[in-house]
Image (cartoon, rainbow, N blue to C red):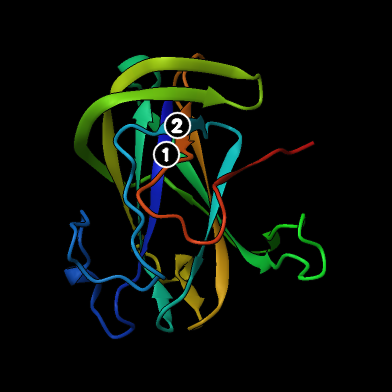
Amino acid sequence: MIKLKSILIFLMMSFALLGVARAHWNEGDPYKMHFPQFPDPEGWDVNATNTGVADDWMCSESGWVKDIHFWGSWKGDIVYPINSFIINIYADVPKNPQDPSSYSMPGQLMKHIVVTNFTYRLAGTSLQGWLDPVIGQILFFNHFNYYQYNIVLTKTADWFYQVEGTIYWLEIIANVASPTTALCCTANYDRKFKNNRVTLFRV
């Protein structure tokens, strides 16, 4: 099973040509979110196959979302083909300032796309744990390798326009070729923005 370790929204300048879009994202490359959130090499990874994993970000400069980059790893380091990624972008529902126990969450769906073209590369190696909140599976010291996945949206209809200062939620769902494996997103990264990553349960 593969898990998404961290999510980075990488936004090309609104006047940039698609020909200069980066297949991979490297530290120091430009971005238009609050700050890049890199994976915790020793973090826990949360199943994101068929069940969505979402995280929020704040736009730091208005423009089109044309690239999405995130990190993931596979349960037991057994890698299977990924048929597609489902990408959903939601509006933010802020927490209630009058209720200390409340929390923000994804709200209205603003964009839905299915991605079949993407690249990936090995990003690092470290001992990591695995979590599937749907079935309550917890596996300590489960796998080593984690990868950077890179999506470049070549169709203008797939782009999403974000507004500076606005908070959005990005959900990623992986459709994996093998029914016995699953893609997952980590709950740990080097710096947290506003919320921990959440699993979206659908009933």
Q: Where is residue 173 in the image (x, y as percent from the top left)?
A: 53, 41
**Residue type, label 2:** Asp
Residue at numbered disc 2: 45
Determine the image quadrant of residue 66.
bottom left
With respect to residue 37, does 125 lie above or below?
above
Q: Residue at x 44, y 38 (%)?
A: 186
Q: Are marks 2 and 1 in contact (CB under 8 Å)?
A: yes
Of 31 and 129, nearer the camera is: 129
Tell me if 7 is positioned left or right of 152 in this view.
right
Q: Position of residue 20 (x, y in %)?
A: 17, 70
Q: Residue 4 carries which label?
A: 1
Q: Residue at x 27, y 37 (%)?
A: 147
Mark 2 or 1, nearer chain start: 1
**Residue type, label 1:** Leu
**Neighbourhood count class around disc 1 (C-alpha, 10 Å): few under 14, some 14–19, many 20 upward:** many
Disc 1 is placed on an element classified as strand
